[in-house]
Image: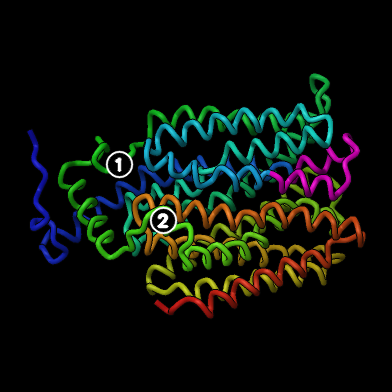
Amino acid sequence: MATTPSSDSIRPNSQTSSAQQAEAYRKVTWRLVPFLFLCYVVAYLDRVNVGFAKLQMLNDLKFSEAAYGLGAGIFFIGYFIFEVPSNLILHRTGARRWIARIMVTWGFLSASMMLVTSETMFYVLRFFLGAAEAGFFPGIILYLTYWFPPRQRARIVALFMTAIAMSGVIGGPLSGWIMTALAGVNGWAGWQWLFLLEGVPSVLIGIAVLFYLDDSIAQAKWLTPPEKAILQTSIQAEQQSQTHMTIGQTLTNPQVLLLSALYFCFIMGLYGVSFWLPQLIKNLGVQNIMTVGLLSAIPYGVAAVCMVLVGQSSDRHSERRWHLVVPALLGAAGLVMAGVFNDQPVLGMMALTLGTAGILSVLPVFWTLPTAFLTGASAAAGIALVNSIGNLAGFLSPYLVGLIKDATGNTRLALYVLAASMVTGALITFAATRKR
């Protein structure tokens, strides 16, 4: 029976340690990140595809812009209520079973959106979709801390979170095609086909999670005993320098609450773009839904590249403050310019691209902050609290944009409000974080 090497044999200054460690992390990265990336692509697509469905369903169902914004945002009320309990359950039961449960449940609920016939039904299904998905994102962030030390997390989280951008790159053209090509087939509207066809993959991938993921390093049969020892030693060394708190202490910790407020500011910008980008592009004079879908891939494609580059740079320089402040300010600038050039297609698209890239590039670096000082159950609770409070902006942001558009007839003022939120986040970051 193979024995696990002692920690003395894998110290960082040993002759073979560096190469062994690099190989172990390369194997873990290729095993976990592409699959988790795929899970998040379908998760985020199911969350925001209502932005494309809006282009048809509002007219079909006679919804107002404010009603759409409320329905889009009410997702995050269910998300907020169940986020912390869901992440604590994941920490206790293991990621494999709980993430599978989350994905299968939300896949069925997302597909059920095709049955919406009234505002009340729209609100109820969006609420339960949020409740079903609660715990997925913070659960993955927590899961990654089981495998990767802090010095690698900005890069790894960036690779994972580019799924947000890639869901736009893939989902934009795909959603446009579904709504155009399948409209009227079997008597269903294009937006009904959209919810059905984009909900099914979540169910299938959720089932695959049961067979693919491992709950811990110790359970990973695809790792050799020396590789497991290297990874576990690295994680244990990290945990010795982290803060150990009870769940109650975590939920009232000033640092955790400050990070929650900071994340709220950034999420205001994220979901303002995510739920309204198709409409913002349409406002530039693009009327064909398929063309809107194709053009929406441009901001997200640029954002995907920027997220990886910023994450790599942040890890390489061991610096977080400026890697948060600068993208946040660029995101704000893009939103302001999108409002200024809202009747000029080329300049408007350039502004939306800058805004989207800046906003999304903030997110991977942000998640290195709570995971740097929380561990164990306190990490499960703290990460979930930060994400749940921050994502309340996901309720406020689309609803606010809808109200402003109904009141003023355009989205210019709403974009300025979202930009102000990004600037506020940048100022909090600058004031509250250290360079390293």
Give the quarter of the image for residue 298: bottom right
Percent of width and height locating residue 100: 47, 32
Residue 331 in sight: yes
In-front residue for pair 167/126 = 126
Give the quarter of the image for residue 106: top right
Assign the magenta stretch its main secondary structure.
Answer: helix
Crowd rating for badge 1 (residues with CA inside 10 Å; few <14, some 14–19, many 20+):
some
Q: In the picture shown, does residue 348 fall above or below 275? A: below
Say which element carries label 2. helix
**Mark 1 / mark 2, whichever is N-terminal:** 2
Q: Residue drawn at (28%, 59%), measured in percent from left and top? A: 239
Q: What's the residue type where badge 2 is placed?
A: Ile
What label does residue 216 carry, if any? 1
Q: Residue drawn at (38%, 28%), measured in percent from left and top? A: 211
Q: Which quadrant, please, contains the C terminus?
A: bottom left
Percent of width and height locating residue 224: 19, 41
Residue that protrudes farthest toward the top in the picture = 186
Percent of width and height locating residue 434: 44, 78
Say which element carries label 1. loop
User: For the magenta stretch, what is the residue range?
Assistant: 51-74
